[in-house]
Amino acid sequence: MFYINCPYCDEYRDEEEFAPKGQAHIARPAEPESCSDEEWGAYLFFRDNPRGVHHELWVHALGCRKFFNITRNSASYEIFETYRMGEQPQVTAQSLADKAKQSGAQAADGGWQTVGSRPENETLNKSSDTSDATSKEGTA
């Protein structure tokens, strides 16, 4: 379980009080009647689902019942910020990548550190088949 800060109530509450409602910042077509079926279907049904930093729409269902946005890492569940409807996010995938570059860390897409990370020992580098065989030999 994690705690979410409602930007309207200004309180950290259990995630059970909130409900996710999908991707944030989706612009409705200005003239929906002039959209093709494919364009209208794409607007209604297709959403981004990235691994990493993502902007989501949530509602404080058991509290103030207002909608707001969350910037969250979909891989680690880390919440970077919450902000009211109509506001723009302060944290983006690009801003986090720029911050990582300034600190000297090298990150892959999605924020995973890949350069300079090493396993605790060499057996973690071996394939699962050989590591299973060595572990069985060690127990016999």
Image (tube, rainbow, N blue to C red):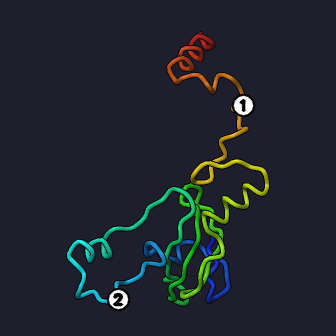
Q: Nearer the viewer, residue 114 or 128?
A: 114
Q: Is residue 45 left or right of residue 97?
A: left
Q: Is residue 83 left or right of residue 50?
A: right
Q: Which mark is residue 120?
A: 1
Residue 75: % across, % down: 55, 55
Q: Which mark is residue 46?
A: none
Q: Is residue 17 above or below residue 132?
A: below
Q: Amino acid at mark 2?
A: Ala
Residue visible at 57% across and 74% down in the picture: 70
Q: Residue furthest left?
A: 37
Q: Earlier in the sequence, mark 1 or mark 2?
A: 2
- Rendered-image quadrant of the C terminus: top right
- Measured in 3D between alpha carbons, the distance from the residue under mark 1 to the one under mark 2, in whole angstroms, is 55 Å
Using a 10 Å C-alpha cutoff, classify the residue at mark 1 as few (fewer than 14 neighbours), some (14 to 19) or many (20 or more).
Answer: few
Residue 9: % across, % down: 63, 88
Q: Nearer the viewer, residue 1 or 10?
A: 10
Count the marks: how many? 2
Disc 1 vs disc 2: which is toward the camera?
Answer: 2
Q: Quadrant of residue 46?
A: bottom left
Residue visible at 61% across and 77% down in the picture: 89
Q: Amino acid at mark 1?
A: Glu
Residue visible at 71% across and 38% down in the picture: 117
Question: Which residue is tagged 2?
Answer: 30
Q: Nearer the viewer, residue 2 or 96?
A: 96
Residue 125: % across, % down: 62, 25
Determine whether the residue tagged by mark 1 lies in a helix, strand or loop.
loop
